Image (tube, helix red, strand yellow):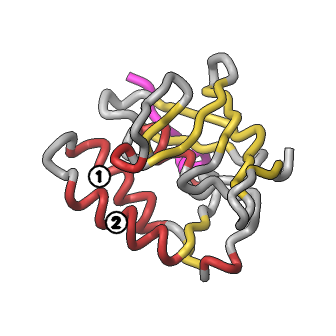
Amino acid sequence: MTTISLSDWGQSPQILVGESEHRRLTATALTSIGADAERTDFLLYELDRAQIVQDALLPPDVVRIGSIVRYRPMPGAERTVKLIISQDDEATGAYRLTVTSVYGAALLGLRPGHIMTWLDPDGKTQRLKVLQVTNPLPGGDPGPSAA
């Protein structure tokens, strides 16, 4: 069994979530609580520790619903995903990741360069690093955010 050190736990970055998305994700988590309690608990924990900001003040490089995120599990190969709420998307593809998944909840609210550390249900330490975030512009066109 791998344990997480207090320094790793304390180094988990502060996450930012917009007000309207916070409400929406809390409702999503609470309505899917019976599906997989451990995953839902992790999402609710992340939402609870998030710094909630006005939607208009959310920086453009923060991972949110609709973000295209390039990240690397540590250890592991780089992945590129679009963070979704599963019922929002008609066509699910290999690159889509639901926010109710463990990796989806871990990515929420992070920015490029952030490293997230958590314990999985088996007690193993998991880590990922955000490499790049691209969010849709207000007009609907995706625009690159900080690399």
For label 1, the residue is 41
Determine the secondary structure under disc 2: helix
Relative image position of residue 85 (x, y in whole percent): 41, 49
Residue ID at (23%, 61%): 30
Which residue sits at x=58%, y=34%? Answer: 127
Residue type for callout 1: Asp
Disc number at residue 60?
none
Q: Is residue 111 left or right of residue 2?
A: right
Tell me which numbered mark, 1 or 2, is placed earlier along the sequence. 2
Image height of 78 relative to 29, above or below: above
**Splitting the image into 4 quarters, where does residue 95 fall?**
top right
Q: 72 or 26, which is in the foreground?
A: 26
**Membership of 67 in magenta stretch:** no
Q: Which residue is mark 2?
A: 26
The answer to which quarter of the image holds residue 140 is: bottom right
- Asked whether, in this view, residue 73 is left or right of residue 30, the answer is right
Q: Is residue 2 magenta?
A: yes
In the displayed structure, 49 sits above or below 126; it is below
Q: Which contiguous range is marked in magenta?
A: 1-9
